[in-house]
Image (spheres, helix red, strand yellow):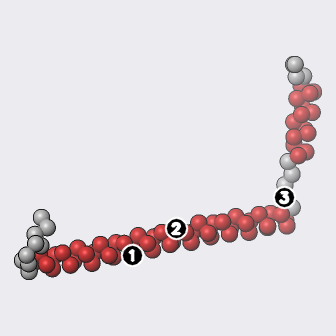
Amino acid sequence: MKLTKKMLKDIIQEEVKKLSEDDEAEETYNYGEDEGEDRKKEDKMKEHIAGIDHHLDALKKDMGYDEDHERRHEKDTDFE
């Protein structure tokens, strides 16, 4: 089937009619939904960062403990 310019123009006009700009209420509602999702993502990232910070603190304490015992030349504390 070959499309004529008129047929193509009619198809495009029909598709354009289907597209409509949200009115103010719809736009506000959609913005609120998007904002809520963004906040959830941000909170999840903050929790992840807090977990990483906690893990790093534990590693630093462990490294400090190991270094203290190396300096004392205690038995079985040669970690090199």
For label 1, the residue is 54
Whether residue 55 sits left or right of residue 16 in the image: it is left
Q: How crowded is mark 2: few (under 14 residues within 10 Å), some or many (20 or more)?
A: few
Front residue of 29 and 24: 29
Q: Nearer the viewer, residue 22 or 44?
A: 44
| Image location (x, y in percent) of residue 17 | 91, 45
76 with respect to 52 (left or right): left
Q: Do the residues labelled 2 and 3 touch (CB within 8 Å)?
A: no
Q: How far apart are marks 3 and 1 (CA)?
A: 45 Å
Q: Residue 5 location in percent, x, y?
A: 89, 25
Counting residues from the start of the chain, the first of labels 1 and 2 encountered is 2
Up-down relation of residue 8 to residue 72 (above or below): above
Give the quarter of the figure containing the N terminus: top right
Q: Which residue is drawn at 90% across and 22% down?
A: 4
Q: Residue 11 carries which label?
A: none
- Give, as a three-letter code, the residue at label 2: Met
Q: What element carries label 2?
A: helix
Within-10-Å neighbours for mark 3: few <14, some 14–19, many 20+: few
Secondary structure type for disc 1:
helix
**Residue 59 found in image quarter:** bottom left
Residue at (68%, 68%) from the top-left corner? Answer: 35
User: Which residue is identified by label 3?
Assistant: 22
The quadrant of the image that shows the C terminus is bottom left
Q: Which of marks 2 and 3 is in front?
A: 2
Horizontal side of residue 33 vs 57, given as left or right:
right
Three-letter code for the amino acid on which mark 1 is drawn: His
At x 89%, y 34%, the residue is 11
Residue that label 2 marks: 45
Residue 34 image offset from top left, x and y in percent: 70, 64
Q: Earlier in the sequence, mark 3 or mark 1?
A: 3
Within the image, what quadrant is residue 62 found in?
bottom left
In this rendered view, identify the residue nearer to me: 52 or 11: 52
